[in-house]
Amino acid sequence: MADMIIEPIEPYALSKKVQVKTLFSRIGVIGCGIEAQGIARIASWYGMEVVLVAKDQEKLESAINGISKELDKRIQSWGLTPSEKRAIMGRIQGSLECSSVAGCDFVIEAIPANPETGFRDLNERKRIFREVEKVVSEDAIIATNATTIVITELASELKKRDRTVSLHFFVSSPEAKIIEVVKGLYTSDTVYERVCKFVELINRDVIPVMESAGIVSMRLYVALLNEACHTLMEGVASMSDIDKTMEIGLGMRFGPFRSADFIGLEKVVIWMENLYEEFGQQKYKPAPLLKRLVRAKRLGVHTKAGFYKYDDEGNIIAEDFLSGKIG
Amino acid sequence: MKILVLNCGSSSIKYQLFTMTDSNWSVIAKGGVEKVGLKGSFLKHEKENGEKVLFEGEIIDHKTGIDYILGVMLSEKHGCMKDLGEIDAVGHRVVHGGETFSSSVFINDEVIDKLEEMVSLAPLHNPPNLKGIYAIQQLMPEVPQVGVFDTAFHQSMPDYAYMYAIPYSLYRKYGIRRYGFHGTSHRYVTKRACEILNVDYNTQKIISCHLGNGASVAAIKNGKSVDTSMGFTPLEGLIMGTRSGDLDPGVITYLMDKEMIGTRSASVLLNKHSGMLGVTGISSDSREIYEAAEGGHELSKLGIRMYDYRIKKYIGSYAAAMGGVDTLIFTGGIGENEKRTRAGVCEGLEFLGIEIDEEINNKSRGKEVVISKPGSKVKVLVVPTNEELVIAEDTKKIVEKL
């Protein structure tokens, strides 16, 4: 390289017309929970630069660490090479400032739920939407990762409301190759199409859905989980056998209990209450067992105990320890 | 006649600009674009005088990359021509030509449609090749384009060599058969070897070993490829840097079950975690493996023995398939530069008439040379490959007929 001349390439463009900006070259992800980690990891996996914004240094480090661990799992299961991991990690840039999403053409709000209440702070999300709009370009898309009716409300905070959209990444199974894309009242067709393009770029299929509580996935899932809890409490079958039945018998990647532990029971309960409020049907009312676990702060993998008990790596260490006593 | 040769990969574009006359050729500019569509993309250009220039900046797709390549070649400062019209034709390397293309072709709409259909056979390679073709269509609509296929040379394989013993309906349904790759390279080095030896290409039995990152052996009888080690995908055959090569298919289903992995991870396992890297745990780079082996690293020694042994088995079987062998060729990065591999492969093959001259072999690196002993029944040669030249020559031939 010693005697090599280095020059910028732009003056050599043959077609003098303005170069189109790269579509989705840089993505902003706000939040540092498992949803945000999943979104950042997937976008970077498919070659996009990612700015991951966290509230404080500790949460940021833990999120980056979480992504790194998840990629290590992929290496162990032969799905990735160490050099590919380095490239993926290299594309993720952490930040503590919302304003660092300035150069992004797509920003996804994915702040985690408050572990105490299970709620994602709506005022905080609105604030984020407003902050993001201040710094991004005119045509940048601002999205939220959600399964609740929220995008229209969040959009109302913005000056340019048609740039908003709601996505649902599947957290319990982040490799599920689908994403529910919700069109809010304000979402323009152009924005919706661009988001579909984004979903395609990260190798997923779009499930177009209307703005409705729980959309498809969560509405059906919570009903299943409730019924699973009742089945368990009636002593029909053991917890792991119920999961196994749904996994093997009906081809679910993870049964209802394991899925709930991944998602976080506090979140599931909130969704259920939300659906119950929206539709007024008993089937959405959280089963007593679920509420009991939440009260006992057994919220799932992230607290190392939910329906199952887990080690630090998220592996199950005790199955069916519920069946004796709740402890 | 000026011919631009393009080789578009998933995130790279390699190019060479040839000036060709009937009897002579020279490269007046060459280089490559790396990291297309990614951060840190650049264009590295080498002028005829060897001077190198690095251009940095965003290169969002193949079309932009080719736009810049043409822009640089036209520029006053670093260029080599005044007008785009000086380029008479563009030749593209196309990885998969399926059963449709058994030789290089002039690219028209019909050919493009066929290539689009073939994307499912080479989902990683054909789409960027097509992007290059589309880019030239847009940037230089008047210039004829030619496609030169990696698979074409092997289309002469007989059916009993290319069929797999699985239900015939799957061949009909998905085109599952052996296609072979590196065809342009095997074609070039075998012809070139016959020129060097001054023998008739159409009467020879030749075994050609292309040993690079990817590696394959081909059997060429009377000027036609009759068998080759790569199959439906470039995963079959020899042990490669990170690819397993031949493997009991039972291992794959067993592993998928035991390691609880899906098809994607299984593919990454066999394509990227395996081969010399997987066995040695050191590297996919032969130089590093030899270094480790010399330092006493047992798995590197094992890897080298496995690598050489696999090639030797193919040489034996291709000699049997052709009823003998007249010429053995080494090419590709390892074949051209690694004397120890050549020696390891040829060791013990004296019964076939393969005897290499240790002294000549040890001195030979990256240049055309006969490395067999004068009395050796089989001539053994090192022939550096030049796929770009083949593409340029084919392109010239085809556009001259237009």
Image: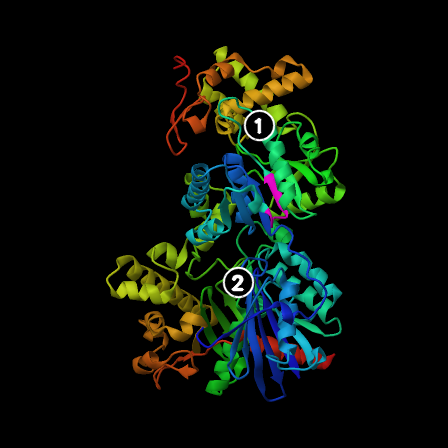
**Residue drawn at (48%, 58%), measured in percent from left and top?**
B236
Image coordinates for residue A183, horizontal then vertical, percent: 71, 35
Which residue is labeled 1 in the image? A121
Q: Which quadrant holds residue A133?
A: top right
Identify the subunit bearing mark 1.
A
Which residue is labeled 2 in the image? B161
What's the mark number on residue B86?
Answer: none
Image coordinates for residue A9, horizontal then vertical, percent: 60, 68
- The reply to whether residue B196 is in sight is yes
Relative side of B276 to A187, left or right: left
Q: Which of A180 and B187 lies nearest the eye of the viewer?
A: A180
The amino acid type, in three-letter code, at marker 1 is Asp
Question: Image height check: is B396 above or below A119?
Answer: below
Q: Given the current orientation, which residue lies at the most extreme bottom position?
A: B23
Relative side of B273 to A7, left or right: left
Image coordinates for residue B301, horizontal then vertical, percent: 29, 62
Q: Which of B302 and B25 lies nearest the eye of the viewer?
A: B25
Mark 2 or mark 1, which is nearer to you?
A: 1
- SS for dot 2: helix
Coloration mode: rainbow
Cα distance in 3D space between marks 2 and 1? 66 Å
Image coordinates for residue B188, horizontal then vertical, percent: 53, 77
Residue A198 on the magenta segment: no
Q: Which of B125 and A271 lies nearest the eye of the viewer?
A: A271
Question: Image height check: is B371 above or below A298?
Answer: below
Segment colored magenta? A102-108
| Picture quarter with the N terminus of chain B | bottom right
**Badge 1 local density, few (<14 within 10 Å), some, or many (20+)?**
some
**Residue drawn at (23%, 62%), measured in percent from left and top?**
B296
**Residue drawn at (56%, 46%), measured in percent from left and top?**
A100
**Residue drawn at (61%, 43%), measured in percent from left and top?**
A107
The amino acid type, in three-letter code, at marker 2 is Ala
